[in-house]
Image: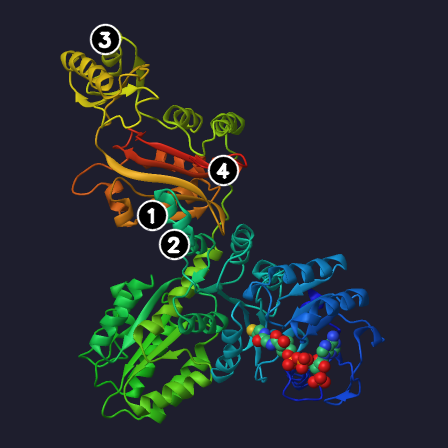
Amino acid sequence: MKRLFDPRSVAVIGASSNPAKIGTRVVANILGGGYHGDVYPINPRGGEILGCTAYPSIEAVEGEVDLAIISIPAAGVLAAIDACGLKGVGHAVVLTSGFSEIGKSEEERQIVEAAKAHGMRILGPNVFGIFSAAASLDATFGPGGIRPGHVAIVSQSGALGIAMIGKTAAESVGLSALVSVGNKSDLDESDLLEYLVDDEGTSVILLYIEGVKGGERLVRTLSKVTERKPVVVIKSGRSTRGAMAAASHTGSLAGADAVFDDLMRQCGVLRATSVQEAFNWVRFLSTAPAPSGTEAVIVTNGGGIGVLATDACEAYDVKLYDDQTVLKETFSGVMPTFGSSKNPVDLTGGASAEDYERALDAVLEEERMDAAIALYCETATADADRFDALLRDLYGRFRDRKPIVFSLFGGASIDRVIRSLRADGVPVFGDVYEAVSPLGALYRSWRGQGREPEEIPEASLDVEAVRSILVTAGAEGRGFLLADEAARVAEELDLPLPASAVARSLEEAVEKASRIGYPVAMKIVSKDVVHKSDAGGVALDLEDETEVVDAYQAILRNCRAYKPTATIEGVEIAEMVRPGIETIVGARRDPSFGPVVMFGLGGIYVEVMKDVAFRAAPVGPRTAREMIASIRSYPLLLGVRGESRKDTDPVAGVIERIGHLVTACPEITDIEINPLVVYDQEDGIRAVDVRILFDPPKGVKRG
Ligand code: COA
């Protein structure tokens, strides 16, 4: 990747004497950006382009070429890639559009194959180029003038990437790299992340993703990167494809975006909801010092805005420093007597600029307070210019020592102050929530970086035993398992199903019911009676022997009347599952991310509540427990209003085992246990219904 980010020489195929051509624009940016290596414009006419000798072909260049930027129409790209390969070029960045994004996937595959044959890598096609601060290389067709710094942006959207050049320049954000991945025919986000994590010039990475390719690798890579550097992601294109293709609750709940959101959290990635929020985060994360703790102090001259900031802190998980004695000691000498030293520290509207400065100085000098959230409402006596100078000075003195954010609220003069401070890199915002949000992002990323990665223990699963059940079912042309087959898989998964036995006579029914314990349920066992309830083949809540005798006779009578030709194998006697908290555990093969597990509130309302969590499988015990604790209904499992705590440890075990199974057994597309009833602690769980779908052997239709 060094030849891509720090090339010794760059050829631009498709540069022209016409300054309006994209290729020429790239050469102009390379020259204007201060690149020190050799630049070779390539044009069949030769001559000179922007003062550089132009070569009629890449073969004609005498020296080595590390990087080729290709900016010619699609029809000529394959031949150009071949020529680059023969020349020994390391990477080709293909700007040209007109490949898989318009359905020309075969043409795209051919250029990747041609590059592979020469050991060359491709960025693109359909990209705006690459900027790398390490080489002072701006090989994009953007507006130029990229400010070097420590934020790396990897964008799938060309337009957004180019717009970022102007935005970052206007707001004094420096870039270490700006890379467009376009169609991701070869190099994708994971390849670039693997380089950027070791790049000393990069302190924060911003990803803009439209669609995920190679999701399993992306999750692994992101998990490693976020241990060392913050990664912010924006994703558009909330597809419902996954949900539409799905044949289970797990599937329909796994709308592509729900899975993406949870998996990013699992990787420690900060997902922003808007481009502006992402921009605010990376800007702050690239300049704020590493926190020493997470307890912030709000200083305000307005009570209302202080309360708003308190709400924002709760929303973004920013803790407020709460030692009232220390707060009183710290602020008693520096604030008006009518102010409040509780956090938010309210200096009130009568506070002078000096009061404000003294109070902020006190927060920033006090070691026990970890960050300052400085709020200011314009007052009649305020002098905006004076305020501008005051904040500038304060930020300059403390910017390397403690995280500070500012929120100023007022009219035109305050807006002017905000603009001028922002242009100089001061983290100042108009809205309180906007100001607190980057601080929350800093803390989330910091907590993630301090976390030990989870070791995933080996699973003790007999995968071959499961596979042989699938093979038998597949041979019958089915893509799903029958209840008894699913029960055998459940046994392998150590899933506690309700106790059951098949009775072939009335005496056996009575004996088995008393062994299982009342109340029991009874159900006809016959392959010929598919809709068992409609046939009168089911009886529930049977309390004693008399009820079992009556039900047995009624079930046989009903089913014989319903289908006289049916072969009846017996009647199943099963434990009636006691009520408890109904949860759902599922696993499936996600089209983008591969094996994922799901946990949530189950039962019949599962799709209404959508209270579920996803993680990439396999998962270890820590992740399984975190999934359980992350759903909104978690308090139900902790026990509400004097109820006892529920037995969640066995649930975590099921999540782990099901994750291992779907990972080890790629034929399985969906497993779902719904409901998985959870009882009080020590009382365990019961899996009431287990459904398993798998890919049947080729040529066999899913049943
Ligand atoms: N080797 C070298 N030069 C070649 C060549 C080759 N194999 N084939 C053509 N050229 C020359 C052309 O003669 C022309 O030079 P000239 O002006 O001296 O005649 C120059 O390269 C450019 O070719 P041209 O045919 O004029 O194409 P163009 O510059 O109008 O368009 C693209 C080329 C790549 C810009 C266009 O096809 C395209 O894909 N545009 C969209 C780009 C985009 O938006 N990308 C995604 C961004 S996110």
Q: Which residue is mark 3?
A: 506
Q: Earlier in the sequence, mark 2 or mark 3?
A: 2
- Looking at the rendered structure, the secondary structure element under dot 4 is loop
Q: Earlier in the sequence, mark 1 or mark 4?
A: 1
What residue is shown at x 21% (from left), y 18% (from top)? 561
Q: Which mark is residue 612?
A: 1
Marks 1 and 3 close (CB-CB < 8 Å): no
- Looking at the rendered structure, the secondary structure element under dot 2 is helix
Marks 2 and 1 close (CB-CB < 8 Å): yes
Q: CA distance from mark 2 to mark 1?
A: 9 Å
- Looking at the rendered structure, the secondary structure element under dot 1 is strand
> Which amino acid, mark 2?
Ala
Residue 151 relative to residue 340: left or right: right
* Residue found farthest to the top: 507
Q: Which residue is mark 4?
A: 695
The N terminus - image quarter: bottom right
